[in-house]
Image (cartoon, rainbow, N blue to C red):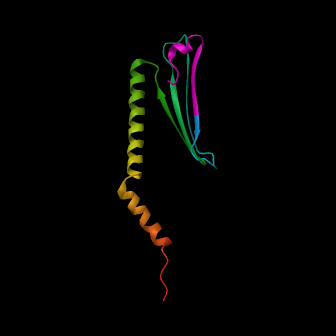
Amino acid sequence: MAKKYKEYQHKKTINHHVRKFLNKKEGMAAIETGFSVKKDKQWGDDASVHISDCSQTITLDFYYSTPEAQQIAVKKLDLIVDVLNNLKADILSDELVEVVEEPVKKMYTRKKTK
């Protein structure tokens, strides 16, 4: 949680909502996360992640109505983060950079004329 729980002691509900757009200049691709917990309820119900790109959208729900469900939700989030970090590392790998750069070099290399 971005803020510590004690900062929320005066509120009746703890809310989390973040939306980040994936493209800087155009399009509506975004990732959005959110949950809401009432202070008088010990556990919340669910958190959600929405990922959208053009007309496609997926929603992942993470239930945390009990301590056990909360642990399962955290494990799922850890797995998703791990898989995405592996994808990022593979995209940045030297092997992939060479494969991607070679056609680009060929495309921009002028043929010598006699």
Count of number-bearing discs: 0
Instruction: Give the vertical position of 25 relative to 103 (above or below).
Output: above
Image position, residue 56 (x, y; %): 57, 46
- When asked about the image quadrant of residue 78, the answer is top left
In the rendered image, residue 13, in percent from the top left (x then y), is placed at: 59, 16
Q: Is residue 53 above or below residue 62?
A: below
Residue at image x 48%, y 74%?
Answer: 109
Residue 112 in the magenta stretch? The answer is no
On the rendered structure, is 38 left or right of 68? Answer: right
Left or right? Give the position of 47 relative to 26. Answer: left
Residue at the spot x=41%, y=18% of the render? 67
The residue most toward the left is: 95
How far across and down, in percent of the image, does residue 18 sit?
Answer: 57, 32
Residue that protrudes farthest toward the bottom in the picture: 114
The segment highlighted magenta reads 1-18
Image location (x, y in percent) of residue 105: 45, 69
Q: Does the magenta segment cover residue 5?
A: yes
- Quadrant of the rendered image containing residue 33: top right
Residue sitting at x 59%, y 35%: 19
Above or below — where is 21 with respect to 67?
Answer: below
Q: Nearer the viewer, residue 1 or 28?
A: 1
45 vs 98, nearest the viewer:
98
Residue at the spot 55% in from the left edge and 29% down from the top edge? 34
